[in-house]
Amino acid sequence: MLFGATGDLATRKLYPAMLKLYEKGNIREHFAVIGTSRHKIDDEKYREIVEKSLAKESSNKKMVSEFASHFYFVTHDVTNVSHYANLKAKSEELDKKYSLGGNRVFYISMAPNFFGIVAKNLKTQHLLSDNGGFNRLVIEKPFGRDFDSAKQLNDELSAAFEENQIFRIDHYLGKEMIQNIEAIRFGNTIFEALWNNRYIDNIQVTLAENLGVEERAGYYDNSGALRDMVQNHIMQIVSLLAMEQPVAFKDTDIRQEKVKALRSLRVYNVAEASTNFVRGQYGGVGNSKEYRQEDGVPKDSNTETFVAGKLLFDNYRWSGTPFYIRTGKKLADKFTRVDVVFKKPLVDIFSFPQSGSTPLNANVLTIFIEPNQGFSLMVNAKNSEQGFHTEPVNLQFLEDSKRTKETPQPYERLIHDVLKGDGTNFASWPEVASAWKFVDQIRRVWDIQQPMFPNYIPGSMGPVSADELLARDHREWVYKLNK
């Protein structure tokens, strides 16, 4: 059952993802989709909308038509309790027609203020299966705008669904190379044995966008980069990098270790937050508007479009090893990457006054998440010149275009996981709560300080203060412009 079935997310992401599952046989005969919204359309018109959204996804019109035949529409106002009777009747009808066994997935592709209302009415109006089938609730971000609102929302959902029935989608967790973090860490002794503060100097996470706020200005100005990117995507990536090895590779064990890692994350006081986090807002250059000139943005807006920060974990594995993060809009390029910087040898035997040799470089493991998918390992090796001189060499693997094209997209992976009941790649409430408690403190400090905006130009990698953040620790970003 899909609430918000005629919306942008459904047509751009959900229907193409479901078609891929249909083409691969993950769903076939025993499935049906009830789409709902306030629009007054019938099944035929709804199927036209579905097929139109898939025009570029497949040239097999017969298969697309067969797929769309499983879709049904019910005009529905989620705030009107009486409307749920129609949904209940249609659910029971299709359960028999397609032999669904009472298995039901409720996907809320709507504004967050409707999450609790829908969950409550699903239970009170008896739409939850009670004949042995499963009930699963899928919701999109944002999950609250601070800890208090997130807790209130979670309490509303928990009144109708158990925690293991709630799937909070973060599409970053469906990306190929995000899921590869666990394989790289726990599948390779050469990395897992060194994955600690004794051998790793620092870890850097960069999520860069080269576009501005575009048509999202209204939403973005009430959110900002800290809430929009750090609280969810970045904190999830960091938890995968920082967690201990789980007892087994299953959702309950993985979530348990992610929560333990996030609970050891140091929540900063006012002075620490001011020192360890910086923010930015893009200015204008040429034909590119500054943020405060974007349509729908107040002329005096102090909403940040860039965040960089230093995270510290107070545990045995990571004590003293900083995690640096940054994300922003209108940066030099669009990419996501993780750079794991290893410590240099305690003694550099190749560098002494009379040798003329340059100091050894740090080994760096880079995980390319997007647009390229793969990883590289920078090692030191002898160059081919006369004498003995070292140079950095990259051992690199990047997926080719054919393999990238065949790789399941995030929503395809995540919808498949929902159908399997696998919560590995979804955020649990304890994870969300820990992330909000950390982010809220940064937000409180920023709310009482007046920023000097705008402070970076489009096409750069953010404000100078982001570089100074690392320079104070005698470090630098691995990815820099002109490098």
Image: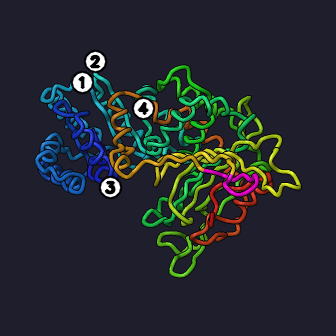
The prevailing secondary structure element of the residues shown in magenta is: loop
What residue would you read off at disc 3? 8
The secondary structure type at the circle numbered 2 is loop
Q: Residue at x 70, y 59 (%)?
A: 466
**Residue position for label 1:** 102
- Mark closest to the chain's N terminus, 2 or 3: 3
Specify start and end residues of the magenta stretch as a single range. 383-393
Residue 363 position, x and y percent, is: 68, 45
Per the image, label 3 sits on a secondary structure element best described as helix
Residue 225: tell me if it is visible.
yes
How far is the residue under mark 2 from the one under mark 1? Answer: 7 Å
Location of residue 12 in the rendering, given as x and y in whole percent from the top left corner: 31, 54
Residue on which the image places disc 4: 166
Task: Where is residue 305? Give x, y as percent.
Answer: 58, 62
**Spatial CA span between label 1 and label 3:** 29 Å
Q: Amino acid at mark 2?
A: Gly
Q: Quadrant of the N terminus?
A: top left
Q: Earlier in the sequence, mark 4 or mark 3?
A: 3
Q: Give the residue displayed 64% in from the left and 40% down from the top.
A: 437
What numbered label is drawn on residue 452? none
Q: Are marks 1 and 4 in contact (CB under 8 Å)?
A: no
